[in-house]
Image: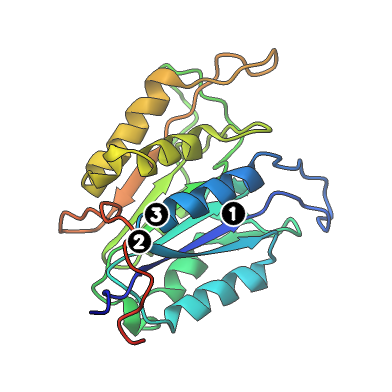
Amino acid sequence: MACPRRNRAVIIVNHQFLQAKERLKSRLGARREADKLFKALSNCNYDVKIFLDVTAKEIEEVYEEESQAEHGKYFVSILSSHGEEGSITDCQGQAVKLTRIYKILSPERCPYLVGKPKIFFIQACRGNRFDDGIYIETDSGAPDEDCFLHYLSIPENTTVMFSCSPGYVSFSNQWESMFLKALLEVLEGEKRKMEITQLMTWINWKIAFFCEAKGSEYKGKKEMPCFVTNMVEEIKPFEQDRECSDYLDH
């Protein structure tokens, strides 16, 4: 008996920016994290593809290909790079708007994912502010309305989790990032069987209470992941172990 079609996952990691016009710091731990994420998602019954140091055009082509592919029950994507609010940075230092990615996977352009949950984990800075881990009052005025536009463009049945809050930096070092380290802890343990919002809330708790930057320059600085969802059903996208290597249509 053939197994059901496996879920699909895409991991996009930009860790060197040799073609960028402005000097961007290499992200030394991101490549190692990609390998660990590949293994963890594969063990959760996902067929996983990794793309390293890709341009904006190549990133869009990756999602265009996914929009025409036959999918299992879920689609997961992890993006890891430098970034700003509403965008990630390609290997040439150019901004890739998240709205472009969401649009490619919208019901109008991606019939194969209509009604199927789509889950994004985004490891990237969303500004240049540093989080001291306390609530502060500010008279800087209301946020720019444009910073919320990419929320409104999220396709139906989609959850997006960001490594930090809007306007803030996200931390990583030569070995790993706070956010993806916590995600890996989930995927590699029994917590992977949790419902998606419980899973993401656990990641928030883990990072809020047990993670902070080290070193003389940023010691004690924090980051606070957040997520946005328009799913109306409870889902457990990582509970299934990989037990079969055949596709339904083989």
Mark 2 highlights which residue? 45
Q: How far apart are the alpha carbons under marks 1 and 2?
A: 27 Å
Mark 3 highlights which residue? 43
Q: Earlier in the sequence, mark 1 or mark 2?
A: 2
Residue 240 image-quadrant placement? bottom left
> Are the residues tagged 1 and 3 within 8 Å (C-beta)?
no
Element at label 2: loop
Residue at image location 36% in from the left, 86% down from the top: 250
Q: Nearer the viewer, residue 217 or 146?
A: 217
Q: Which residue type does callout 3 highlight?
A: Asn
Instruction: Determine crowd level at label 1: few under 14, some 14-19, many 20+ residues with C-alpha closer than 10 A.
Output: many
Q: Earlier in the sequence, mark 1 or mark 3?
A: 3
Residue at image location 68% in from the left, 59% down from the top: 90
Q: Which residue type does callout 1 highlight?
A: Ile
Image: 181 above or below 231: above
Residue at image location 69% in from the left, 17% down from the top: 217
Mark 1 highlights which residue? 88
